[in-house]
Image: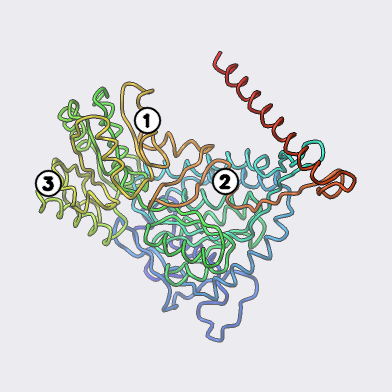
Amino acid sequence: MSSTDPPTVIGDAPTLTARRIDGLADRVARSRPANDGDGDEADGGDTGDDDGDDPDAIDVFAPATSERIGRVPACDADDVERAVERAREAQAEWAGTPAAERARIVDRFGDLVADRREELLDVLQLETGKSRRTAVEELFDVPTGCSYVAREAPDALAEERRRGVAPGVTTATVTREPVGVVGVISPWNYPLTLSMADAIPALAAGNAVVLKPDEKTPYGALLLSELLEVAGLPDDLFQVVTGEGPTVGPPLVDAVDYVAFTGSTATGRVIAERAGRNLIGCSLELGGNNPLVVLGDADVDEVARGAVQACFSNAGQLCLSAERVYVVESAYEEFLDAFVRETEALTLGTGYDYDADLGSLVDADQLARVESHVEDARERGATVETGGRARPDVAPYCYEPTVLTGVDPDATVACEETFGPVATVRPVPDAAAAVAAANDSPYGLNASVWTADRERGAEVAREIDCGTVNVNDAFLATWGAVDAPMGGFGDSGLGRRHGHEGIHRYTETRTVGVSRVGPLTFPDRIPTDWFVRGAFAGMRIARGARRGVDALRRRLSRR
């Protein structure tokens, strides 16, 4: 899709041009050319609006300057339907491709992401406004995830022998089949990582994927679709549809066989309800108002450095960010001083270098949300220890990292996810009170515990009602453990990504049972009452033997 008067902000990105951005928009899956009023489908797959006159196209803006950087098609239900149809046709052959070959394509894609990192980083910064440092952290996650999936998927998808009903007489084998077409709805805050963390295992499991990126950040997804094609992924197996969520989301959920969504709890509930009506599976990573717990024996200087990462990474626009900090009273004053000092040392900027720690919020709405939460806390008596103001001198939507104390428990910032660079700090009497405060939330996505005693930290972590809990780390100890499942409790979602669980969610299991002796029923030549008595006697013996073996194993394991 062509744009007029190429924005200067694209010129600031070292590897990008307006022509390149327009070319990415042409990769969007459409059922017809945008200006074709007769509704005939276009031959040859994806098309774009070459003259830029589509009145329904969506403008995409750069948070760093608020300039328009391009336009993408506003897909509709027909576009979604055709994209899913094409994906389904391609998936039939892909499902028969050996898992090892699918894994090799995933691995090649990971290499391409690493090789093309400069262009990907530029696109990522252009459409999100995040700092280069944060962009690198996000991008690094994609090839890491590809390596894991490429290595583990063939084994995770292999046939598995299970114990039959009568060992030696019957067998039971579990096979895993792809669900078909997976719909992925990804957010704007980490558009590369969170789209690929869902799409890559789905592809490796033999599915097709139709990705709906957030309308604020479509270009990274479109560039990744290009790299998947270069890696050898068959045509039409990975489709991208762009558009407004209320327009594109419902027909996507209705057309696919599974949906993976990352976003708000409110939208997640709507998707879960629709998926339930369609009797399809879904995984949902939703909101969080994440706690950070500082025990009395913690090294406060180390914790302060970690808390800055936990609270302010990506300007707080991270599902795993800590927003509620609870500090045991004996360490409170010293920690608060150190935390404020570390926070004030952070630098703001949106340049294509590594000078800035934090970048911009994504748009005016997000800035307004942050400002309203801080203002509400102030009006209720909170103290702003540092920050608390917008920085339009840096970028239109920049906001200073902010530390609040004395926050009313009913303040909006205490009860809801701010999703910005704002942290509240509160003293508590002891570890038990910290755990109780951490669990006083409907959310349960991520938490961290900080202490000099790692074993005690792990014990406390087990008491916190979150899907991932880190000890002496902000979030990478769990998020980066891609062999372990990741997801939320309560209002923070359903299902898990990462690990074998993140691959298995995209499959249906089939159990094949084989009898070596024919029908398993009452024998003809033995009186039924004799058989029943004998069967229960045999069961009693077998159960007793099993308990004896289990007891012996427990004793041996304690030696």
List x then y, in percent, for residue 176.
68, 49
Mark carried by residue 215: none
Mark carried by residue 382: 3
Mark nearest the camera among 2 and 1 is 1
- Is residue 385 toward the left or the right of residue 107 in the image? left
Q: CA distance from mark 1 to mark 3?
A: 29 Å
Q: Amino acid at mark 1?
A: Val
Q: Amino acid at mark 3?
A: Ala
| 437 vs 490: above or below | above
Q: CA distance from mark 3 to mark 2?
A: 49 Å
List x then y, in percent, for residue 191.
44, 53
- Is residue 79 toward the left or the right of residue 330 in the image? right
| 102 vs 78: above or below | above
Secondary structure category for the residue under label 1? strand
Q: CA distance from mark 2 to mark 1?
A: 34 Å
Mark 2 or 1, nearer chain start? 2
Mark carried by residue 471: 1
List x then y, in percent, for residue 233.
65, 54
Secondary structure category for the residue under label 2? helix
List x then y, in percent, for residue 188.
40, 56
Residue 40 in sight in this render? yes
Front-most of residues 196 and 228:
196
Mark carried by residue 112: 2
